[in-house]
């Protein structure tokens, strides 16, 4: 079972450790993602986790998929913590967002985590993390 950690998705300025859903549009920022895989053996899977964040405009405006160069790939073997008693594997990743990747506006923030095999084909498991409304000002 694929499930979010707590908190699942947060954002912060690249130059700060303070979490925020209100960020200046003229500074880089980071989407921090945590998730867990339970009831499975992550060490038996091969390939990568494919992570994409979507900013859906509230009202008129452009929408974005981040990172701008395509999904962030995290090796399935790159778990940060394991609980052998429950078979739960924890993962953490950061999507770095540059100034030119998104413009000022208000957005609904959705992050998708999905395994991909070694050929890049997406697997059947998928997790959607709906974050806070994000306001990029300036």
Image: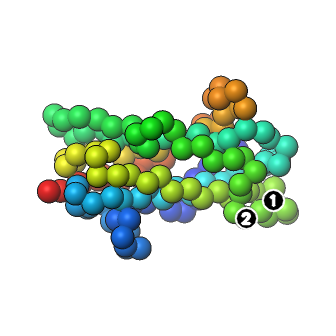
Residue 29 is situated, as x and y percent measured from the top left of the image, at 36, 59
Q: Quadrant of the rendered structure where residue 51 is?
A: top right
* Cα separation between marks 1 and 2: 12 Å
Asked if the residue at tag 2 contacts the one at tag 1, i.e. Cβ–Cβ closer than 8 Å, the answer is: no
Q: Which of 71 and 20 is in front in this view?
A: 71
Q: How crowded is mark 2: few (under 14 residues within 10 Å), some or many (20 or more)?
A: few
> How would you rate the neighbour count of disc 1 (Cα within 10 Å): few for under 14, some for 14-19, many for 20 or more?
few
- Residue labelled with disc 1: 86
In the picture, measured across the screen, residue 111 lies left or right of residue 55, that is right
Q: Which of marks 1 and 2 is in front?
A: 2
Q: How many marks?
A: 2
Classify the position of the C terminus by image quarter: bottom left
Q: Position of residue 111 (x, y in %)?
A: 46, 44
For image coordinates 71% across by 57% down, the residue present is: 79
Instruction: Give whichever of discs 1 and 2 has the lower sequence position.
Output: 2
Nearer-the-camera pick, 83 or 33? 33
Question: For mark 2, what is the residue?
Answer: 81
The answer, for residue 2, to whether it is visible in the render is no
* Residue 73 horizontal side relative to residue 96, left or right: right
Label 1: element kind: loop
Residue 14 circle label = none
Q: In which quarter of the image is residue 63?
A: top left
Whether residue 35 is situated above or below residue 64 in the rendered picture: below
Which quadrant of the rendered structure holds the N terminus?
Answer: top right
Residue 30 in view: yes
Q: In which quarter of the image is residue 15?
A: bottom left
Residue beneath the point at 69% across and 47% down: 75
Q: Where is residue 76 in the image (x, y as percent from the top left)?
A: 72, 47
Measured along the vertical axis of the image, is residue 134 above or below residue 52? below
**111 to 135, vertically: above or below:** above
Q: At 23% across and 34% down in the image, what residue appears?
A: 62
Helix, strand or loop status at disc 2: strand
């Amino acid at each position: 079972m694929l499930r979010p950690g707590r908190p699942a998705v947060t954002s912060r300025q690249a130059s700060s450790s303070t979490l925020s859903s209100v960020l200046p549009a003229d500074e880089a920022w980071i989407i921090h993602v945590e998730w867990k895989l339970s009831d499975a053996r992550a060490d038996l899977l091969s390939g990568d986790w494919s992570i994409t964040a979507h900013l859906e405009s509230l009202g008129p405006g452009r929408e974005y998929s981040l990172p701008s160069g395509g999904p962030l790939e995290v090796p399935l073997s790159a778990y940060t913590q394991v609980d052998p008693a429950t078979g739960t594997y924890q993962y953490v990743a950061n999507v770095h967002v540059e100034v030119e990747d998104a413009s000022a506006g208000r957005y609904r923030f959705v992050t998708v985590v999905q395994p991909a095999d070694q050929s890049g084909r997406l697997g059947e498991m998928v997790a959607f993390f709906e974050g806070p409304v994000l306001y990029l000002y300036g």
